[in-house]
Image (cartoon, helix red, strand yellow):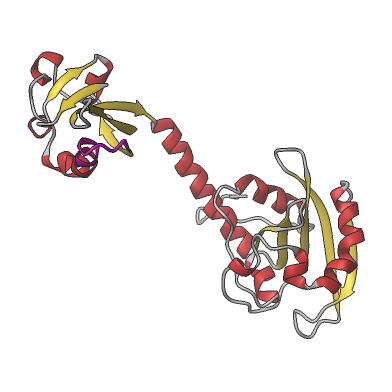
């Protein structure tokens, strides 16, 4: 924690705050301006946030900082204005929290999510995941293409809105069985993909983190389909449940010939 006055000079720094001031001591920091301590690139990066805080706004941002040992780590910085009774800003309290482990984990999960979305979009089946309100949570590329819709026209909508009331009513009894935890397989006539009379489908229950049932729907994919229907951020766990429910053996390989999933 530190205190920077309206002239950008340090008036207070606690001992943990020194962890982010390489080569400095409390004695030689107090009274110096921010641009006398940090290199120009750091000052340029934080200038806008500091100016906003000195104008009276609470500001929070994340950036990579350098510890006293020279290690690069992600930190979350919160700037809190110190306002006088008159409303003028006398200075800014700065609170720095090390979030490096959290940031690295978040980046790893984002990479994993991107890989899973890639796998889903390249599956040779049409797959969708609906919640217990029968609204689409996500769909893969084949599912969206087979219905001639963009992802935005499907996600968040009900089965009736996407496939029509007649089809939704026909599937309602099966969906109820799936929501009760039963895996269900059926066949029906379909106008898509073109040229196929029978459209075998599988409905499989998926258990979410809250213990409620949802269901997965799969079917044949139209050959040569192009395009994209992605997934919302933060759905990696649901996506893994979808993949595990698909009645097809599949895996992916890295360039080093190692099995990735």
Identify the residue at horizontal 57%, vertical 55% (top origin).
Answer: 232
Q: Is residue 258 visible?
A: yes
> Which residues, given as a range, are shown in magenta?
51-59
Identify the residue at horizontal 24%, vertical 15% (top origin).
Answer: 14
Image quadrant in which you'd find residue 76:
top left
Indicate left or right for 235 with 220 as reference: left
- Quadrant into which the N terminus falls: top left
Quick check: 109 above or below 217?
A: above
Indicate left or right for 70 with 97 as reference: left
Viewer-nearest residue: 230 or 121: 230
Indicate left or right for 254 with 146 as reference: left
Quick check: 50 above or below 94?
A: below
Judge whether residue 56 is colored magenta: yes
Q: Is residue 72 visible?
A: no
Identify the residue at horizontal 16%, vertical 44% (top origin).
Answer: 44
Image quadrant in which you'd find residue 229:
bottom right
- Give x and y (percent) for residue 72: 28, 33
Viewer-nearest residue: 24 or 81: 81
Q: How many marks?
A: 0
């Amino acid at each position: 924690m530190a205190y920077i006055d309206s002239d950008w000079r340090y008036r207070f720094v606690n001992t943990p705050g020194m962890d982010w001031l390489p080569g400095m001591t409390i004695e030689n920091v107090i009274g110096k301006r921010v641009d006398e301590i940090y290199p120009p690139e750091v000052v340029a990066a934080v200038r806008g946030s500091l100016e906003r805080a000195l104008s009276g706004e609470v500001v929070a941002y994340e950036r990579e900082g350098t510890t006293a040992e020279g290690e690069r780590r992600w930190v979350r910085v919160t700037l809190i204005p110190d306002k006088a009774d008159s409303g003028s800003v006398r200075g800014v309290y700065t609170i720095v929290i090390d979030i490096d482990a959290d940031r690295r984990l978040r980046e790893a999960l984002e990479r994993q999510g991107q890989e899973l979305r890639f796998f889903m979009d390249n599956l040779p089946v049409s797959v969708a995941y609906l919640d217990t309100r029968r609204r689409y949570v996500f769909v893969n590329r084949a599912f969206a293409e087979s219905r001639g819709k963009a992802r935005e026209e499907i996600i968040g909508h009900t089965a009736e809105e996407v496939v029509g009331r007649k089809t939704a009513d026909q599937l309602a009894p099966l969906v109820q069985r799936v929501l009760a935890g039963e895996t269900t397989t059926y066949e029906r006539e379909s106008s898509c993909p073109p040229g196929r009379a029978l459209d075998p489908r599988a409905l499989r229950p998926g258990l979410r983190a809250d213990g409620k049932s949802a269901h997965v729907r799969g079917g044949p994919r139209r050959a040569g389909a192009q395009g994209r229907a992605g997934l919302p951020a933060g759905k990696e766990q649901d996506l893994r449940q979808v993949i595990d429910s698909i009645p097809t053996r599949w895996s992916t390989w890295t360039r080093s010939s190692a099995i990735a999933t």
